[in-house]
Amino acid sequence: MRHTGHAMLNTSEQLVVAAAAAAAPSVFNTQPWSFVFTDGSFEVRADPDQAALPTASAARDVRLSCGAAVFNARVALARLGHGSGVSVLPDATDPLLVARVALTGGAPDPALDELYRWVGSRRTNRYPFRPEAIPAPVLAQLHDAARREGAALRLLDGEPEYQRMLTSIRRATWTEDEAVREDRGARLSDRADPPAIPVENLGPVPRRELPDDPPVRDMAEGLGLPGRPSASFEPHPDLAVLETADDAPAAWITAGQALQRLLLEATGHGIAASFANQPLEDAELRPEVSAGAAHYGCPQMVLRMGYATTRPPASPRRPLKEVVGSGRG
């Protein structure tokens, strides 16, 4: 499967790249993208209609999701033996063209090649984690993964920063707009085809054992879905914020690539992750994520990380025939 020096992808290689890109995480698993193979390149296009969400962060989340798909495409090309280069937002007249990943004819990046093995294993894990801290050397590698893609990972490892984040998450959950909750409920319904997030991927209902809610996002909060068990969650998970230097659309794509790189690194170390982005979905609450902190820039993702007790099934993916279009060659 490994063969360097080719400037074109054959049909089987195209399928490998498209499948890897489609395996990326996305907002509510909406997969808001389409892919086009052209002469010697792979284009990722945004599909906002696929993720028409009533949140303030909808446009940002679409580009961030597409950025994660771009990174997976780079990883797959490296596994196939191809070097690649990325042009982000390469056409000012076509804002839905998120990025063009071009074959360079050079040697593949061995670090990207190594990450390919985790593309199919990565899961967004909404189940309880073991009450075990992530070792400092592993956290350092996750920091480096974000840095290599132009972002920063800020671990919330001290007070009052940690409690401030928990307060923001809880406040965002309590004050969530009813339209947002109803929209998410419709996407979780068994009638959706496919569901954005299947019920079996939601994890259990967090058991209320402490004075405050546990620091985990219940995607079905307030929806009363039947058949979900309850469980105790870890009281003090590792929380981190992924940040970029600015908040333009190109930065959102940067954040997506950085997110996927650190998630694949984390998967290789046996670390699971889910997201607590409630404050980032509210324009008024988003500034609180960086309030009072020595931060790098603009918050793009809030991650909950730890060692999983349960491995959830893979979320369904749109058929490739729906997301792969035709290009010039």
Image (cartoon, rainbow, N blue to C red):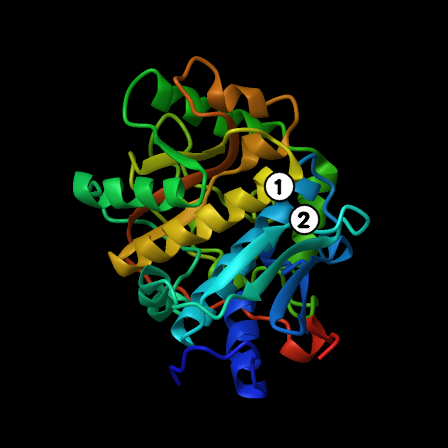
Percent from the top left, x then y, of residue 60? Answer: 65, 41
Residue occupying the point 32% across, 55% down = 265
Percent from the top left, x then y, of residue 138? Answer: 22, 46
Q: Looking at the picture, which amino acid does disc 1 mark?
A: Ala
Percent from the top left, x then y, of residue 232? Answer: 32, 45
Residue 34 seen by the camera? yes
Residue occupying the point 35% across, 67% down = 113
Say which mark, if any, is on residue 250.
Answer: 1
Quadrant the N terminus occupies: bottom left
Sort mark 1 into few (<14), some (14-19) or many (20+) by Cα contacts within 10 Å. Answer: some
For this rendering, which residue is in front, 175 or 116?
116
For this rendering, which residue is in front, 190 or 294?
294
Residue at the top extreme, as displayed: 292
Say which mark, if any, is on residue 89.
Answer: 2
Residue 214 seen by the camera? no
Residue occupying the point 75% across, 53% down = 96
* Position above or below: 289 against 272: above
Percent from the top left, x then y, of residue 105? Answer: 48, 70
